[in-house]
Amino acid sequence: MKRQPTLKTVLLAGVLLMTTTMSAVAVDKSSLKDGLYALIDTNRGEILVNLEFEKTPLTVINFTGLAEGKIDANKKGNYYDGIKFHRVIDDFMIQGGDPTGTGSGGPGYNFPDEIDNSLQFDGPGILAMANAGPGTNGSQFFITHVETSWLQGKHTIFGKVLEGQDVVNAIKANDKINTIEVIRVGAKAEAFENDQKAFDAALEKLAGAEMRKKAEAQKSILEEINKKWPDAQVSKSGIRYIIEKEGSGSKPTTGTNVKVHYTGMFLDGRKFDSSVDRGTPFEFPAGGGRVIAGWDETILDMKKGEKRTIILPPELAYGSRGAGGVIPPDAWLLFEVELLDF
């Protein structure tokens, strides 16, 4: 069975930017029916998208609020302006929305999925949120080239291309979003608020008591981590790490085959895996999405011979899905990692 590509957020090697452009799609706004739309202007032309603001209100508030600079994020102003499509897979999709352009960045917060089963990955032009697992939506989104039914239930669909699918199909890696214009037609769309207050209210409604309970549990865990490892440094993404042994030389680049030894443990010290115990180092291409996101980020920041203790939050490990009946959902994990060679 042919393995379908996944949409895990990953670091990708650069692709030569094609400089050819297309003529912009002429959008007649006066002909639009009542609804909420996004006009995505790219260096290859315009893409007009209908937004499902009634079925997925939180996601649309987030997308349009970021586009108009109304949501508190770590990139000020109109968030998407100038951001590139960092990931493009032919006959699959285009992905953008990361201000760092690496595939690992976001607005500085996550929010839950809004899966509506009436919205399906049934053809080209589906606009959906990229994520690293359940409940890890931020600012990254993708638009499909074709039907991608294997993604159903894993990603929040919140819109569909009305015009400009040819532009979607022409976009290459590192092409850019110039601007995103939010178009409101009709009373409902005009009344649709997309500022921080509206986001917070929609989040509260969606999350409910269960999400609050989960957040409180995670906060408690984080407090315990800070007490147990007070000297740990913290990366921008939230990885806590202690350099146990300094390395030397350069750091590996994306795609470089690396050789590491590791031991994986839960925070209470229970071991769940170890290449050291097996006596065989683990080899994989750095930054290629072959391992969990926290590993990719860590290895690319290490030097040869360096050894670290790293503590990964769930969203950079196995998220709400867990793994293999061994890693439970929403688990923080500790790894002792040594970069042997590359």
Image (cartoon, rainbow, N blue to C red):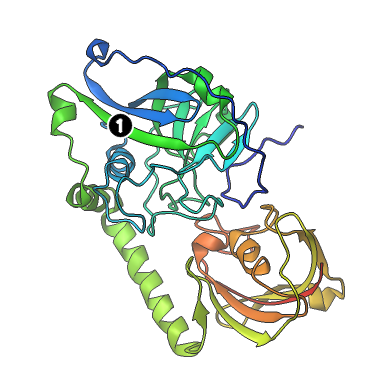
Query: Is residue 296 depicted above or below 161 in this figure?
Result: below
Q: Quadrant of residue 66?
A: top left
Q: Is residue 329 left or right of residue 69?
A: right
Q: In the depicted view, which residue is nearer to us: 1 or 251?
A: 251
Q: Quadrant of the N terminus?
A: top right
Q: Is residue 268 left or right of residue 157?
A: right
Element on which disc 1 rests: strand
Query: Is residue 240 depicted above or below 323 in this figure?
Result: below
Percent x, y of residue 71:
26, 51
The residue drawn where x is 50% and y is 26% is 44
Dot 1: within a 10 Å radius of its alpha carbon, few (fewer than 14), some, or many (20 or more) residues?
A: some
Percent x, y of residue 307:
70, 81
Q: Quadrant of residue 327?
A: bottom right
The residue lying furthest to the top in this view is 31
Q: Amino acid at mark 1?
A: Glu
Percent x, y of residue 186:
16, 21
The residue drawn where x is 83% and y is 70% is 281
Residue underneath mark 1: 181
The residue lying furthest to the right in this view is 279
The residue drawn where x is 64% and y is 49% is 12
Q: In the depicted view, which residue is nearer to us: 81 or 96?
A: 81
Percent x, y of residue 320:
49, 57
Is residue 9 at all visible to an observer of this figure?
yes
